[in-house]
C-alpha cells in the first residue's frame, strides 16, 4: 500500500509540474488569410504569452476541412510557418507568414489557423500541442487542374 501511495504521489507531482509549465498563449485581435497561386499568407494582429515561463518552439498551421474543424479530424494541412519562442509576458504584433500551399482536392473548405507549441512528453520525447486557433466563417474554393490540363494530348 505504501508503494502505491508513493507512486501515485510521484505521478501526480510529475503531471502537475508538466501542466503547470504549459504556456498560456493566445491569438488576439484581427486575423486573416489570403490564398494566391501556390502560397497562403496568414496575418495575425497579436500573439501573447501570458505565462510566467518562456514558450517552447512555436508554429502556425493552416488547415482546410470540408466540415467545421475538430481536434480529432483537422482536415488537410495547407501550410505551416515557424515562429520564435516568446519570453514570459512577451507578445508578437502584426505577425505575417507566407507559406507554401499544399493544395487540397477541388471543393469548398473551411479554413482554420492553429498556434502550436512544442512541449516535452513524460517519456522524454517531444510533441506539438495546440494552444489556440482561429476559425474563419467563410469557405474557400480550391480547384486543382487535371493532369495535363489544358492540353490533354
Image (cartoon, rainbow, N blue to C red):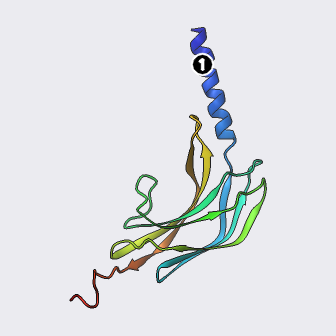
Numbered-mark total: 1
The crowding category of the residue bearing disc 1, from other C-alpha atoms within 10 Å (few below 14, some 14 to 19, many at least 20), is few
- Rendered-image quadrant of the N terminus: top right
Relative to 72, residue 67 above or below: below
Residue drawn at x 75%, y 63% is: 91
Q: Which residue is mark 1?
A: 7
- Rendered-image quadrant of the C terminus: bottom left
Badge 1 marks a residue whose secondary structure is helix
Q: Residue furthest front?
A: 153
Residue drawn at x 37%, y 75% is: 108
Relative to 45, residue 126 above or below: above
Residue 63 x/y as whole percent: 47, 65
Q: In the figure, residue 96 lies in which quadrant?
A: bottom right
Residue 28 x/y as whole percent: 67, 66
Residue 8 x/y as whole percent: 59, 21
Q: In the figure, residue 14 lies in which quadrant?
A: top right
Work out whether residue 33 or residue 122 is closer to the camera in this orientation and state it: 122
Amino acid at each position: 500500500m505504501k508503494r502505491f501511495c508513493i507512486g501515485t504521489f510521484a505521478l501526480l507531482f510529475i503531471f502537475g509540474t508538466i501542466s503547470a509549465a504549459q504556456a498560456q498563449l493566445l491569438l488576439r485581435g484581427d486575423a486573416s488569410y489570403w490564398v494566391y497561386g501556390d502560397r497562403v499568407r496568414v496575418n495575425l494582429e497579436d500573439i501573447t504569452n501570458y505565462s510566467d515561463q518562456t514558450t517552447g518552439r512555436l508554429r502556425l498551421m493552416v488547415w482546410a476541412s470540408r466540415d467545421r474543424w475538430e481536434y480529432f479530424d483537422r482536415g488537410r494541412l495547407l501550410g505551416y510557418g515557424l515562429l520564435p519562442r516568446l519570453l514570459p509576458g512577451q507578445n508578437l504584433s502584426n505577425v505575417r507568414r507566407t507559406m507554401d500551399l499544399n493544395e487540397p482536392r477541388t471543393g469548398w473548405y473551411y479554413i482554420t489557423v492553429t498556434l502550436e507549441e512544442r512541449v516535452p512528453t513524460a517519456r522524454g520525447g517531444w510533441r506539438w500541442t495546440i494552444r489556440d486557433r482561429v476559425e474563419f466563417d467563410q469557405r474557400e474554393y480550391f480547384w486543382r487542374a487535371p493532369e495535363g490540363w489544358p492540353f490533354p494530348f
